[in-house]
Image (tube, rainbow, N blue to C red):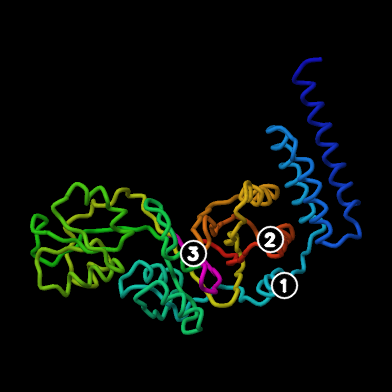
Amino acid sequence: MEPNKRIEEIDAEIKRLFGERLEMTRLADDGMSSSEIALKCRKYEREMLVNAGSLDRILLKTMFNLSRSYKMTNYGDNDSELVRNIRAALDNTPRTFPSTALVACQGVEGAYSQIAADKLFSGADIMFFKTFEGVFKAVEEGAAQYGVLPIENSTYGSVIAVYDLMRVHKFHIARSIKLKINHRLLTKSGTCFEDIREIYSHEQAIGQCSRFLKDNPQINVTIVANTAIAAQMVADSDRNDVAAISSPDCAQLYGLSTIRDDIMNSDHNYTRFICISKNLEIFPGASKMSIMMALGHTPGSLSDTLVKFSSLGLNLTKIESRPIAGRDFEFMFYLDIDCSVYSEDVLALLGQLDSDPTDFTYLGSYLEV
């Protein structure tokens, strides 16, 4: 027989046998509690894997993971507390995203977070805070209805300070937005480029303009809390040898001059901001989901979890890991997934993840604009 034809026949037989195995699994688990099923499967899988060769282990582990995903989506618990909360949010969230709100942002007037907030809300009443933590607390304590925070940049990566704070505060993501960043070198009127001896800016902006700064080693760099604060510091300074890496909005706001507009590493420079709320709100059109989870420090724990998403055909668009303070070599993983929260399979997945003994937090389902 021609080899390709035989491969097709083998694949068809494997598919048939795996389907039969899934059905036998369902029958074997019938009448058993969740804990009884888990213990039985763990014992069986360990016995099968202990003497298996490397290729056999890969095949068996893949089969076991797919089998668990089948159980989850076909006869799992779609009525956990988390799933009930999500269904309630879908029913109770207004049909349209609000046009006005009291919004918390880090920095001062002119900050990129404020620009993002003004694009999300046509009439945002903005409260400014010195730190990212101030924004989280304002939302968590109900002082602000929403908060806008930078989460990652297309050229300089994740805003680590925000990710670290996500683990210790209670919030939900209601929307996200990608904002094009246009850094400029701003000075007071009359200052020439040759005069500059110090530049103020935020760590992210400095990283996004690192090539320009490397080419000008004679200029000292001072990190400040925000690009808008950097512009404010230059405007208020009595020095004529300082500059700020900031936005065109800040140039106009603080009466500064743009002396260089070619300082970014890339013209394709975008920052993604999340809009957070205290209560779970899921507005129509939500097509992205964010979660975070701490996985056990065991071989294959991450891949075993990721296969649950791949078995449903879900696309992971972001995965970020951060060490958990006080736990040696344990990490919190943050995942963004393109998926619909209206899918019963997705709800079953969330219910199963929420029932696992590992730390799991559903951050929200939302639309990115």
Q: Could you tell me which residue is drawn at 37 percent across and 71 percent down?
A: 114
Amino acid at pointer 1: Glu
Q: CA distance from mark 3 to mark 2?
A: 23 Å
Labelled disc at residue 137: none
Q: Nearer the viewer, mark 3 or mark 1?
A: 3
Residue nearest the viewer, comparing 338 with 222: 222
Q: Is residue 254 left or right of residue 18?
A: left
Q: Which residue is tagged 3?
A: 325
Label located before the other in sequence (2 or 1): 1
Residue 47, percent across and down?
A: 79, 43
List the residue tagged with mark 2.
353
Q: Secondary structure at mark 3?
A: loop
Cα separation, mark 2 vs mark 1, equals 12 Å
The residue shown at (51%, 84%) is: 142
Q: Is residue 109 above or below residue 264?
A: below
Compared with 349, 96 (above or below) is below
* Residue 135 location (% of width, % of height): 43, 75
Q: Which quarter of the picture shows residue 249? A: bottom left
Q: What's the magenta region?
A: 167-178
Report, in whole angstroms, how far the alpha carbon at label 3 lies from the one at label 1: 28 Å
- Name the mark on residue 81: 1
Q: Residues within 10 Å of mark 3 (few under 14, many from 20)?
A: few
